[in-house]
Amino acid sequence: MIDERLKDARLVVSVSGGKDSTAMCLHLFELGYSKNDFDRVFMNTGWEHQYTYAYLDELEKTIGPIIRLQADIKVRDEHKDHVEHFEKRIGFKSPMIRRILLHQSFPTRNGKWCTQELKIKPVIKHVQSLDYNYVMLVGIRREESPRRAKMTEWEWSDAFDCWVWRPLIDWKEKDVIDIHKRFSLVPNRLYLNGSTRVGCWPCINSRKKEILNIDEERISLIRDLENTCTKLKRERKGQDQLQSTFFHSPIKGVPIMTIDEVRSWSSTARGGKQFELFSAEEPTCVRWGMCEFK
Protein backbone atom coordinates (compact mmCIF):
# COMPACT_ATOMS: atom_id res chain seq x y z
CA MET A 1 0.00 0.00 0.00
CA ILE A 2 1.38 3.41 -1.01
CA ASP A 3 1.81 5.92 1.77
CA GLU A 4 -0.50 8.92 1.32
CA ARG A 5 2.52 11.24 1.49
CA LEU A 6 3.97 9.63 -1.63
CA LYS A 7 0.88 10.08 -3.78
CA ASP A 8 1.27 12.80 -6.43
CA ALA A 9 4.78 13.58 -5.13
CA ARG A 10 8.10 13.20 -6.91
CA LEU A 11 10.97 11.69 -4.95
CA VAL A 12 14.18 13.70 -4.52
CA VAL A 13 16.97 11.43 -3.32
CA SER A 14 20.09 12.76 -1.60
CA VAL A 15 23.07 10.88 -3.06
CA SER A 16 26.55 11.11 -1.52
CA GLY A 17 28.48 8.34 -3.23
CA GLY A 18 28.25 6.44 0.05
CA LYS A 19 26.84 2.99 0.69
CA ASP A 20 23.58 4.06 2.36
CA SER A 21 22.40 6.57 -0.23
CA THR A 22 23.29 4.07 -2.95
CA ALA A 23 21.39 1.32 -1.14
CA MET A 24 18.41 3.66 -0.91
CA CYS A 25 18.31 4.07 -4.70
CA LEU A 26 18.60 0.31 -5.17
CA HIS A 27 15.82 -0.19 -2.62
CA LEU A 28 13.55 2.07 -4.68
CA PHE A 29 14.14 -0.17 -7.69
CA GLU A 30 13.12 -3.18 -5.62
CA LEU A 31 9.98 -1.31 -4.56
CA GLY A 32 9.06 -0.94 -8.22
CA TYR A 33 10.32 2.56 -9.00
CA SER A 34 12.23 3.25 -12.22
CA LYS A 35 15.08 5.70 -12.88
CA ASN A 36 12.54 8.17 -14.25
CA ASP A 37 10.47 8.14 -11.07
CA PHE A 38 12.92 10.02 -8.84
CA ASP A 39 15.59 12.72 -8.94
CA ARG A 40 19.08 12.12 -7.60
CA VAL A 41 20.99 15.11 -6.18
CA PHE A 42 24.58 15.30 -4.99
CA MET A 43 25.76 18.22 -2.84
CA ASN A 44 29.31 18.79 -4.06
CA THR A 45 31.41 20.52 -1.41
CA GLY A 46 34.54 20.35 -3.56
CA TRP A 47 36.20 18.46 -0.71
CA GLU A 48 35.36 14.84 -1.55
CA HIS A 49 37.87 12.13 -2.33
CA GLN A 50 38.74 11.51 -6.00
CA TYR A 51 37.35 7.98 -5.59
CA THR A 52 33.95 9.45 -4.73
CA TYR A 53 33.80 11.65 -7.83
CA ALA A 54 34.83 8.70 -10.02
CA TYR A 55 32.31 6.43 -8.29
CA LEU A 56 29.44 8.87 -8.87
CA ASP A 57 30.23 8.96 -12.59
CA GLU A 58 30.16 5.16 -12.68
CA LEU A 59 27.09 4.93 -10.42
CA GLU A 60 24.99 6.87 -12.92
CA LYS A 61 25.02 3.80 -15.17
CA THR A 62 23.04 1.94 -12.49
CA ILE A 63 20.84 4.52 -10.77
CA GLY A 64 20.47 7.18 -13.49
CA PRO A 65 21.67 10.79 -13.96
CA ILE A 66 22.77 12.66 -10.83
CA ILE A 67 22.17 16.40 -10.46
CA ARG A 68 25.33 18.06 -9.06
CA LEU A 69 24.69 21.03 -6.74
CA GLN A 70 27.27 23.48 -5.39
CA ALA A 71 27.18 26.41 -2.99
CA ASP A 72 28.13 29.77 -4.46
CA ILE A 73 30.81 31.12 -2.12
CA LYS A 74 32.09 34.60 -2.87
CA VAL A 75 35.80 35.25 -3.35
CA ARG A 76 37.34 38.46 -2.08
CA ASP A 77 39.78 40.25 -4.37
CA GLU A 78 42.61 39.80 -1.89
CA HIS A 79 42.03 36.02 -1.84
CA LYS A 80 41.71 35.40 -5.59
CA ASP A 81 45.32 34.31 -6.05
CA HIS A 82 45.08 31.89 -3.12
CA VAL A 83 41.80 30.41 -4.38
CA GLU A 84 43.22 30.00 -7.87
CA HIS A 85 46.34 28.32 -6.46
CA PHE A 86 44.49 25.75 -4.37
CA GLU A 87 41.78 24.99 -6.92
CA LYS A 88 44.45 24.48 -9.57
CA ARG A 89 46.09 21.93 -7.27
CA ILE A 90 42.92 19.86 -6.90
CA GLY A 91 41.69 20.45 -10.45
CA PHE A 92 38.20 21.84 -9.83
CA LYS A 93 36.14 24.51 -8.10
CA SER A 94 35.89 23.97 -4.34
CA PRO A 95 33.27 25.79 -2.22
CA MET A 96 34.97 24.28 0.84
CA ILE A 97 38.34 25.87 0.06
CA ARG A 98 36.67 29.18 -0.86
CA ARG A 99 34.78 29.27 2.45
CA ILE A 100 37.91 28.38 4.43
CA LEU A 101 39.92 31.19 2.83
CA LEU A 102 37.04 33.68 3.13
CA HIS A 103 37.15 33.53 6.94
CA GLN A 104 40.60 31.94 7.42
CA SER A 105 39.00 29.21 9.51
CA PHE A 106 37.99 25.59 9.25
CA PRO A 107 34.73 23.94 10.34
CA THR A 108 34.67 22.99 14.02
CA ARG A 109 32.56 20.64 16.11
CA ASN A 110 30.71 23.61 17.57
CA GLY A 111 30.63 25.55 14.31
CA LYS A 112 30.03 22.95 11.62
CA TRP A 113 29.20 25.42 8.87
CA CYS A 114 30.24 22.92 6.19
CA THR A 115 26.98 20.95 6.42
CA GLN A 116 24.69 23.96 6.58
CA GLU A 117 26.37 26.18 3.98
CA LEU A 118 27.77 23.63 1.53
CA LYS A 119 25.11 20.92 1.61
CA ILE A 120 21.78 21.99 3.09
CA LYS A 121 21.51 25.49 1.57
CA PRO A 122 22.21 24.34 -2.03
CA VAL A 123 19.61 21.58 -1.87
CA ILE A 124 17.03 23.92 -0.30
CA LYS A 125 17.64 26.37 -3.15
CA HIS A 126 17.20 23.52 -5.63
CA VAL A 127 13.95 22.10 -4.26
CA GLN A 128 12.46 25.58 -3.88
CA SER A 129 12.86 25.98 -7.64
CA LEU A 130 10.77 22.86 -8.36
CA ASP A 131 7.26 23.37 -9.66
CA TYR A 132 5.86 20.08 -8.35
CA ASN A 133 5.22 18.39 -5.00
CA TYR A 134 8.18 16.40 -3.74
CA VAL A 135 9.41 14.19 -0.89
CA MET A 136 13.06 14.21 0.20
CA LEU A 137 14.72 10.84 0.79
CA VAL A 138 17.74 10.54 3.09
CA GLY A 139 19.79 7.36 3.68
CA ILE A 140 20.01 7.50 7.46
CA ARG A 141 20.01 4.40 9.69
CA ARG A 142 19.32 4.25 13.42
CA GLU A 143 22.28 2.00 14.22
CA GLU A 144 24.76 4.62 13.01
CA SER A 145 24.70 6.82 16.12
CA PRO A 146 22.74 7.59 19.33
CA ARG A 147 21.39 10.78 17.73
CA ARG A 148 20.14 8.97 14.66
CA ALA A 149 18.67 6.22 16.83
CA LYS A 150 16.03 8.74 17.93
CA MET A 151 15.00 9.66 14.38
CA THR A 152 11.74 8.56 12.81
CA GLU A 153 11.06 7.17 9.35
CA TRP A 154 8.94 10.20 8.42
CA GLU A 155 9.39 13.80 9.48
CA TRP A 156 8.09 17.13 8.20
CA SER A 157 10.86 19.61 7.38
CA ASP A 158 10.10 23.33 7.45
CA ALA A 159 13.49 24.01 5.87
CA PHE A 160 12.76 21.83 2.83
CA ASP A 161 9.01 22.55 3.01
CA CYS A 162 8.24 18.89 2.46
CA TRP A 163 8.13 15.46 4.05
CA VAL A 164 11.48 13.75 4.63
CA TRP A 165 11.42 9.98 4.23
CA ARG A 166 14.14 7.72 5.69
CA PRO A 167 13.33 4.34 4.12
CA LEU A 168 16.47 2.64 5.51
CA ILE A 169 15.98 3.83 9.09
CA ASP A 170 15.78 0.28 10.52
CA TRP A 171 18.32 -1.32 8.20
CA LYS A 172 21.54 -2.87 9.48
CA GLU A 173 24.89 -2.58 7.73
CA LYS A 174 24.46 -6.16 6.52
CA ASP A 175 21.24 -5.16 4.75
CA VAL A 176 23.13 -2.39 2.94
CA ILE A 177 25.91 -4.77 1.88
CA ASP A 178 23.41 -7.42 0.78
CA ILE A 179 21.47 -5.12 -1.55
CA HIS A 180 24.73 -4.05 -3.23
CA LYS A 181 25.44 -7.74 -3.83
CA ARG A 182 21.96 -8.39 -5.21
CA PHE A 183 22.63 -5.72 -7.83
CA SER A 184 26.24 -6.91 -8.35
CA LEU A 185 27.36 -3.39 -7.49
CA VAL A 186 30.81 -2.73 -5.99
CA PRO A 187 30.69 0.12 -3.44
CA ASN A 188 32.86 3.21 -3.31
CA ARG A 189 36.46 1.98 -3.06
CA LEU A 190 36.97 4.03 0.09
CA TYR A 191 34.98 1.42 2.04
CA LEU A 192 37.14 -1.40 0.73
CA ASN A 193 40.29 0.53 1.70
CA GLY A 194 39.34 1.06 5.35
CA SER A 195 36.93 4.01 5.52
CA THR A 196 33.71 3.61 7.48
CA ARG A 197 31.96 6.54 5.81
CA VAL A 198 32.08 8.61 2.64
CA GLY A 199 31.85 12.37 2.42
CA CYS A 200 34.29 15.20 2.95
CA TRP A 201 37.87 14.00 2.66
CA PRO A 202 38.68 14.29 5.37
CA CYS A 203 35.78 15.18 7.65
CA ILE A 204 36.59 17.19 10.78
CA ASN A 205 35.00 14.33 12.75
CA SER A 206 37.18 11.62 11.19
CA ARG A 207 38.06 8.63 13.33
CA LYS A 208 41.66 7.90 14.23
CA LYS A 209 42.02 5.19 11.60
CA GLU A 210 40.50 7.43 8.93
CA ILE A 211 43.04 10.15 9.72
CA LEU A 212 45.82 7.59 9.41
CA ASN A 213 44.51 6.66 5.96
CA ILE A 214 44.63 10.21 4.57
CA ASP A 215 46.98 10.24 1.60
CA GLU A 216 50.10 12.40 1.59
CA GLU A 217 48.80 14.65 -1.19
CA ARG A 218 45.79 15.59 0.95
CA ILE A 219 47.96 16.08 4.02
CA SER A 220 50.13 18.48 2.02
CA LEU A 221 47.06 20.39 0.82
CA ILE A 222 45.70 20.76 4.35
CA ARG A 223 49.12 21.77 5.66
CA ASP A 224 49.37 24.55 3.08
CA LEU A 225 45.78 25.65 3.80
CA GLU A 226 46.58 25.82 7.52
CA ASN A 227 49.71 27.90 6.86
CA THR A 228 47.93 30.23 4.43
CA CYS A 229 44.96 30.79 6.75
CA THR A 230 47.24 31.37 9.72
CA LYS A 231 49.24 33.97 7.77
CA LEU A 232 46.10 35.76 6.52
CA LYS A 233 44.46 35.75 9.93
CA ARG A 234 47.56 37.13 11.67
CA GLU A 235 47.84 39.89 9.07
CA ARG A 236 44.15 40.76 9.40
CA LYS A 237 44.03 40.80 13.20
CA GLY A 238 47.60 41.79 13.97
CA GLN A 239 48.08 38.96 16.45
CA ASP A 240 51.06 36.69 15.87
CA GLN A 241 49.87 33.96 18.24
CA LEU A 242 46.78 33.09 16.16
CA GLN A 243 46.79 29.77 14.34
CA SER A 244 44.28 28.03 12.05
CA THR A 245 44.17 24.23 12.14
CA PHE A 246 41.94 21.70 10.40
CA PHE A 247 41.37 19.22 13.22
CA HIS A 248 40.29 19.76 16.80
CA SER A 249 43.12 18.66 19.10
CA PRO A 250 42.52 15.01 20.09
CA ILE A 251 44.81 15.24 23.13
CA LYS A 252 43.51 16.66 26.39
CA GLY A 253 45.57 19.62 27.58
CA VAL A 254 46.94 20.35 24.10
CA PRO A 255 44.74 23.15 22.70
CA ILE A 256 46.06 23.24 19.12
CA MET A 257 47.58 20.59 16.86
CA THR A 258 48.55 20.97 13.21
CA ILE A 259 47.64 18.39 10.58
CA ASP A 260 51.12 16.86 10.84
CA GLU A 261 50.82 16.52 14.61
CA VAL A 262 47.34 14.97 14.38
CA ARG A 263 48.50 12.61 11.66
CA SER A 264 51.41 11.50 13.85
CA TRP A 265 49.00 10.96 16.77
CA SER A 266 46.73 8.82 14.56
CA SER A 267 49.44 6.14 14.32
CA THR A 268 49.68 5.75 18.11
CA ALA A 269 47.92 3.66 20.73
CA ARG A 270 47.48 3.95 24.51
CA GLY A 271 46.33 7.56 24.47
CA GLY A 272 49.04 8.65 22.06
CA LYS A 273 51.90 7.32 24.19
CA GLN A 274 52.91 4.37 22.03
CA PHE A 275 53.15 3.81 18.28
CA GLU A 276 50.80 1.09 17.04
CA LEU A 277 52.58 -1.42 14.81
CA PHE A 278 49.68 -3.74 14.03
CA SER A 279 45.90 -3.37 13.82
CA ALA A 280 43.61 -6.14 15.07
CA GLU A 281 40.61 -4.60 13.34
CA GLU A 282 39.09 -6.63 10.50
CA PRO A 283 39.65 -5.02 7.08
CA THR A 284 36.44 -3.42 5.84
CA CYS A 285 36.72 -5.23 2.51
CA VAL A 286 36.26 -8.52 4.40
CA ARG A 287 32.85 -7.38 5.67
CA TRP A 288 31.89 -6.66 2.06
CA GLY A 289 33.46 -9.89 0.79
CA MET A 290 35.06 -7.83 -1.98
CA CYS A 291 38.77 -7.51 -1.14
CA GLU A 292 39.61 -8.33 -4.76
CA PHE A 293 38.16 -4.93 -5.77
CA LYS A 294 40.39 -2.82 -3.49
Image (cartoon, rainbow, N blue to C red):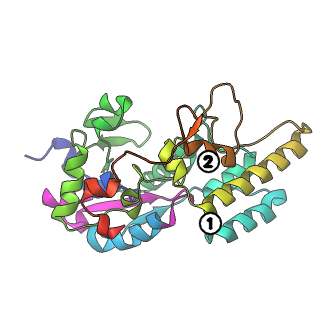
Label whose residue precedes the other's in the sequence (1 or 2): 1
Q: Which residue is mark 2?
A: 263
Q: Which residue is mark 1?
A: 93
The amino acid type found where label 2 is placed reads: Arg
Quarter of the figure with the C terminus: bottom left
The amino acid type found where label 1 is placed reads: Lys
Is residue 91 found inside the magenta-colored segment of the image? no
Q: Within 10 Å of the Cα at label 1, are there few (<14), some (14-19), or many (20+) other Cα atoms?
A: some
Answer left or right for 99 relative to 182: right
Answer left or right for 114 relative to 13: right
Farthest right residue in view: 238
* Residue 292 seen from this side: yes
| Residue shown at the point (50%, 67%) measured from the top left | 50
Farthest top residue in view: 253
| Residue shown at the point (27%, 64%) measured from the top left | 290
Mark 1 touching mark 2, by CB under 8 A?
A: no
Q: Where does the magenta region start and end?
A: 25-50
Residue 29: horizontal and vertical position, in percent?
A: 18, 61
Task: Estimate the spatial distance between the alpha carbons at disc 1 and disc 2, rounded to whole Å.
Answer: 26 Å
Secondary structure category for the residue under label 2: helix
Residue 133: horizontal and vertical position, in percent?
A: 30, 51
| Residue shown at the point (32%, 62%) measured from the top left | 187
Secondary structure category for the residue under label 1: loop
Answer left or right for 183 relative to 212: left
Which of the 4 image quarters holds residue 83? Answer: bottom right
* Residue 33 seen from this side: no
Residue 30: horizontal and vertical position, in percent?
A: 14, 59
Where is 293 relative to 22, above or below?
below
Farthest left residue in view: 1
Q: What is the number of the mark on residue 268?
A: none
